[in-house]
Image (cartoon, rainbow, N blue to C red):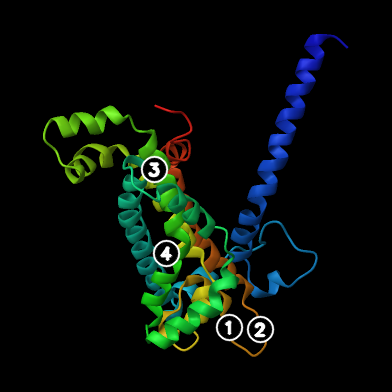
Amino acid sequence: MNKATRLVLSRIGFWILIVVIFVYLLFPFYWAFVSALKTQAELIQTPATLWPADPTLQNFRAVFQNESFMRSLLNSTFVALAVTLLSLGIGSFAGYALGKMRFRGRTPSLYLILAMTMFPQIAVLAGLYAVIRFLGISAMPSMILTYMLFTLPFTVWVLTSFFRGLPASLLQAAQVDGATMMQAFRHVLLPLTAPALVTTGLLAFIQAWNEYLFALTFTVIEEQSRTIPVAIALFTGEVARQEPFGEIMAAAVTVTVPLVILVLVFQNRIVEGLTAGSVKG
């Protein structure tokens, strides 16, 4: 076997591997979409079909006519946006201080922030719920504060790396022109952090949008504050012991599409943000 043949076979094998990975990753989304177009009778028939015999939008209509689902959609949007904005606001100040300022305890603070990202959610759930109940905080604010325990450390860590990678000459030039540390941050350095802000903001939004465990726990009593994952998990059928798979899949597709659109729109910024700080500038 000559070199040219080996090269062709290696390329064929590479593309076969790419196709297999592509199908493996996208098939669950395809199956959810196809299931959302099937009737209840076709969903339970065997063998299962890869495409509905008579596609219908009834499941999507039922989802959008569900008042509980629409209220949960608004709740998730409010909570996710609040968590994202608060994480970016606090994280940008913290990242600037940890990345560009010198003070005692900076390195231990960074390691402490990194350690906070390693705690599993279930390990702190009971303690947080007890504190929330003791303070009498309602479900929506409690979810926002709780989600920030997991989004804020990641945001601070990424933004710290980004600020540290910015040239020190930018800050020095701003100070020479008479700018204070806060003015240099707001007018010079912060606009340059757009890729990192988009990346961390989008990841924080996705984490808050998809969170289920804390949302289920904090909304046990306040049903009107349920978010999308909880609402989908608690979907009930029209008759007893009926599992509305079609409506569940339609709801899952509905809440996934906005995230996919956000990732596609900001994909270039995401790559820039994730690679920020990897090369010293």
**C-beta proximity under 8 Å, tags 2 and 4:** no
Q: Quadrant of residue 48?
A: bottom right
Q: Nearer the viewer, mark 1 or mark 3?
A: 3
Circles 1 and 4 in contact, beta carbons < 8 Å:
no
Whole-percent x, y for residue 86 in the image: 33, 61
Q: State how far apart marks 2 and 1 are (Cα).
A: 7 Å
Q: Residue at 67% across / 62% down in the picture?
A: 53
Residue underneath mark 1? 236
Give the residue at mark 4. Answer: 148
Q: CA distance from mark 1 to mark 3?
A: 41 Å
Secondary structure at numbered mark 4: helix
Lower position in the chain sequence, tag 2 or tag 3: 3
Which residue is most to the left?
178
Q: Where residue 267 is drawn, which disc sits there?
A: none
**Residue marked by disc 2:** 242
For label 1, the SS is loop
> Who is closer to the viewer here, 253 or 17?
17
Viewer-nearest of labels 2 and 3?
3
